[in-house]
Amino acid sequence: MDKIPVIIDCDPGLDDALMLMLAHGSGRFDIRAVTISAGKQTQAKTLQNALKILTLIGATDIPVHHGAEKPLLRDLVVSNDVHGESGLDGPSLPIPEMQAQPVSAVEGIASILSASETPITIAATGPLTNIATFLLAYPQLKSKIERISLMGGGIFRGNMTPLAEFNIYTDPEAAAIVFRAGVPITMCGLDVTHKALVFQKDIDLFRALGNQAGQVAADLMDFFSIFYRENRVELNGGAAMHDPCAIAWLMNPGIFTTKSCYVDVETKGELTSGATVVDFYNTLHKEPNATVAYDIDRDAFLDMLFNAIKALP
């Protein structure tokens, strides 16, 4: 089976770390680069976190590019309450054995797409600042993007406001640019990621793998679970594995339930800024611009994650 060429744009982040484990450990991807945005923490912290995780999983040959320091038009909002002061609180992580590339995320994406003979998929699991900036700077390269598989938004719910999810809320202007770009998009929002849950019995299985990646994965999930058990009691002790969904869909879309919808982003609403407006019932009669996931086979998803982390050091 041919590997899927992909650029991963992320803001590690506990669930970004698990997403990188899934992407690399699965063996299904030709990861051309990892580009970093500020989001769950500052750019300096998310960049270091990416270098630590890639060192942990033996992926030091993957180029890493520093990205946006802040959203396009807004001040940066970080997520200390969920991901901790470092963005990766919980596990013990190695000192990075690699350094970031000297060129920026946008320039790195442009260089990779320009050189590629075939279109490349982008998996985006943080604020969409880097991707939007790239689309504005290099519109001629848009056709070289096979698809953007992103974690962000929600159909019927938010987590920063009643309707706005963190990644989109952090930089709604960037998200609006991406959704309006005419590139094929898969959106894994809160409606599906709140069904991609890990419970304590699952965490114990990851720890029992006995490898370093399994231990770190379990520690990440333990720390992540603290917030969910205190603040998302409706999930009955489960912690949502948001970012791995964007990679899991690329690996096996069949484990997801999706619908083609028109999606736009609210940038000006007094109560709804950062909300993804998903026309789930086709009331606007506009051409769909996204494949929107809203359900998942949790057991199949966990098997996928478990097998990938099992294959890591």
Image: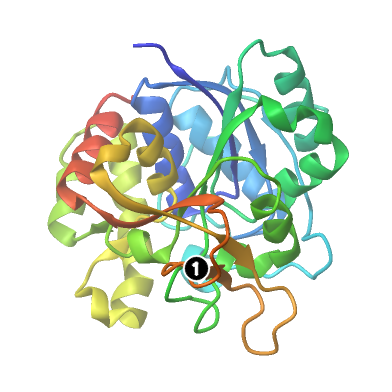
Describe residue 257's horizontal placement relative to residue 158 as left or right. left
Q: Is residue 7 in view?
A: no
Residue 53: x and y in percent read 50, 37
Q: Nearer the viewer, residue 180 or 113?
A: 180
Describe residue 285's horizontal placement relative to residue 298 as left or right. right
Say which quarter of the image contains residue 276: bottom right
> Residue at coordinates 24% horizontally, 43% vertically from top-left?
255
- Name the colouring of the figure: rainbow
Callout 1: SS:
loop
> Residue at coordinates 56% horizontally, 51% vertically from top-left?
289
> In the current view of this chain or complex, which residue is farthest to the bottom?
270
Describe residue 102's horizontal placement relative to residue 234 as left or right. right
> In the current view of this chain or complex, which residue is farthest to the right?
137
Vertical side of 158 occupied by 302: above or below: above
- Which quadrant holds the C terminus? top left
- Which quadrant holds the N terminus? top left
Vertical side of 96 occupied by 285: above or below: below
Residue 176: x and y in percent read 70, 60
Label 1 CA crowd tier, 10 Å (few <14, some 14–19, many 20+) = some
> Residue at coordinates 19% horizontally, 61% vertically from top-left?
199
Q: Which residue has dot 1 on it? A: 279
Q: Nearer the viewer, residue 136 or 237?
A: 136
Q: Nearer the viewer, residue 69 or 129?
A: 129
Q: Number of marks in the image?
A: 1
Residue 297: x and y in percent read 20, 50
Say which quarter of the image contains residue 166: bottom right
Residue 29: x and y in percent read 44, 22
Q: Amino acid at mark 1?
A: Asp
> Residue at coordinates 82% horizontally, 29% vertically from top-left?
140
Q: Is residue 271 in view?
A: yes
